[in-house]
Image (tube, coloured by chain):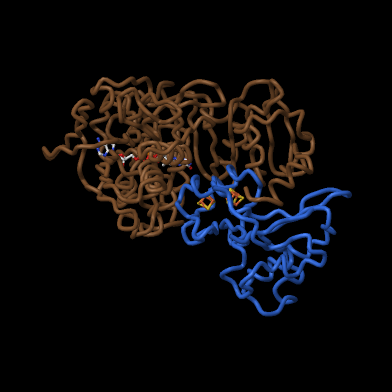
Amino acid sequence: MKKYVIIGNGTAAVGCVEGIRSVDKKSKITIISEEKHAVYSRPLISYYLEGKTDLHRMKYRGDSFCEDNDCRVLYGTRAVSIDPEKKLVALNDGAKLDYDALCVATGSRPFVPPFEGLETVEKKFSFMKLDDALALEGTLTKVARVLIVGAGLIGLKCAEGIRDRVGEITVCDLADRVLSSILDADCAKIVQERLEANGLHFLLGDTAVRFEKSKAVMKSGKTVEFDVLVLAVGVRANTELVKEAGGNVNRGIVVDEKLQTTLPCVFAAGDCAEGFDASIGANRVLAILPNAYLQGHAAGVNMAGGKACFDNAIPMNSIGFFGYHIMTAGAYDGEMIEEKTGSGVKRFFIGENRLKGYILLGEVERAGIYTSLIRERTPLDTIDFDLMKKVATNMIYSEKERRKTFGDVV
Amino acid sequence: MKRIYVNEKWCLGCHLCEYNCAFANSGMKDMVLALKDKKIFPRIHIEGDERITFAVSCRHCTDPLCVKSCIAGAISKVDGVVKIDKTKCVGCLTCVLVCPHGALSLGEDGVMQKCELCLENACGKPACVTGCPNRAIVYEERGDKA
Ligand SMILES: Cc1cc2nc3c(=O)[nH]c(=O)nc-3n(C[C@H](O)[C@H](O)[C@H](O)COP(=O)(O)OP(=O)(O)OC[C@H]3O[C@@H](n4cnc5c(N)ncnc54)[C@H](O)[C@@H]3O)c2cc1C
Ligand code: SF4
Ligand code: SF4
């Protein structure tokens, strides 16, 4: 019998539990969870405010998850240090847990730059946790003016979630475009127009430099009056536990394709980890939910003595605003091929006989076929890529390949 | 487990499977009332050109990326069948982003849907297979991957 300990209780932790249990049905699993809620789907906090889900449905796993998987969760408990030599995790209540294999799945936290006068703002929130969403919800009124700092995924999802519950929303960002981490300038412009048509106001290439209670003074000198402030500037990986224990840490906890850190018997997965990104051929934090699960699962399998190698991670996002869908994947280098479709645009990035990346706006049908070409590094001269510029289709593959997919077990 | 298998050489491209699927999952008793003059939302679709056609539906993958990627934990695999809990889905399309076979689509209600082998509707076995006039889709046991 082994003892497994997981720090954090998010998607990566669930992946880890399910990975462990795919190999080892018996040994003890203990999860240390700073948050007091049963594991929930973090991306759903904006859908909760929008009324598209509720506290029960947004649970990531069913109520019997812990029982079914025989794991113990220490809610409201924080891990404060790791002793890799004695294989102990110290908790904030003074207790110590010993482990044979440890998974650090601590996620990330909001990055809040030091704004002058921030302490004078009464109603200010981050947007990362269910408790953030619940606290923000308490301030939403039909006349509230909301200022969101950050036009990235989190800030804009927040805006969508609260739009119908507030008076006015202004989003500012130092970047000159929305979703700057996943869209190029042209695509960002199209998306911004959609968002504006849905009532959002933008101040781009500009950001708050000083707050005076309910007033933000912008870099440009403009001022914005608001009642509620949401700070969604960016996130930072929670790497401290591993760093202080002597493990290798860059922007995230450095892991290999087995999800092992540089500390013996210590694994890391999810938003806190910096694993191999096949689209750029180097390590990078990929703070997306599928990656958290896949890394967690692979870590779990390896912790339990199985063999899992996760070496084909790529960045990818599917995000919708007010019914308009956006999908992106891979890296945007190589030659760009654009295809205009009915309600949108497709941009493919091609180089070295491979699909490197794409941006799809509006029409996203069967996009997983494109994603798979990036992930599997499929040589483009073995398929008929031209066939699928407009709509993704399995026709690009040879009859033999199709027979494998649809006439056999996959 | 039993799965759906497709033989494209025998597919006539008649789209009957799409209609049978939409009807089977409509919960209605009368096919005409269920489908006539309506846009249908089947969980199987025909792809192809003038020469080749074939039916595409969920492969119930051994390693289902959709299950691992769903941001709401709405997709699960139970006894080999990959299912969606429609009450949990928020329509983010992350499953569409990752499914390598293009097997998922949005339903009429704006919520994701996929083939669940008709095991829980009134048919009890895949309606597309039952209705295929040329045995281009079959439902049979061909083993499992390790
Ligand atoms: C608003 C929002 C929308 C998003 N939308 C999407 C989306 O549409 N698609 C997508 O792919 N991704 C999305 N994401 C990102 C996605 O939520 C994350 O990638 C994913 O949740 C990461 O999972 P994780 O398990 O690594 O970390 P988390 O879910 O952050 O879990 C980590 C947990 O560890 C706990 N913890 C940290 N330190 C300690 C400690 N020392 N002791 C005990 N517990 C600790 C934390 O409290 C937290 O509960 C979104 C994120 C947000 C905030
Ligand atoms: S939806 Fe796609 S990824 Fe999921 S099991 Fe079916 S074929 Fe596989
Ligand atoms: S669309 Fe629904 S089923 Fe698909 S990933 Fe999103 S929440 Fe899950």
Location of residue B53 in the rendering, given as x and y in whole percent from the top left corner: 81, 52
- Asked if A144 appears above or below B134 in the picture, the reply is above
Q: Residue at x 52, y 28 (%)?
A: A180
Residue ranking furthest to the right? B50
| Camera sees residue A178 | no
Location of residue A44 in the rendering, given as x and y in whole percent from the top left corner: 42, 49
Q: Name which quarter of the figure residue A87 lies in.
A: top left
Q: Residue at x 78, y 40 (%)?
A: A398
Q: Name which quarter of the figure residue A318 lies in.
A: top right
Residue placed most toward the observer, A252 or A183 = A252
The chain shown in brown is which? Answer: A
Residue ranking furthest to the left? A94
Q: Name which quarter of the figure residue A281 lies in.
A: top right
- The quarter of the rendering in which ligand 1 is drawn is top left
Residue ranking furthest to the bottom? B29
| Camera sees residue A60 | yes
Location of residue B71 in the rendering, given as x and y in whole percent from the top left corner: 47, 47
Which tint is chain B?
blue
Residue placed most toward the observer, A211 or B58 = B58
Q: Is residue A362 left or right of residue A222?
A: right
Q: Residue at x 78, y 60 (%)?
A: B136
Total numbered labels: 0
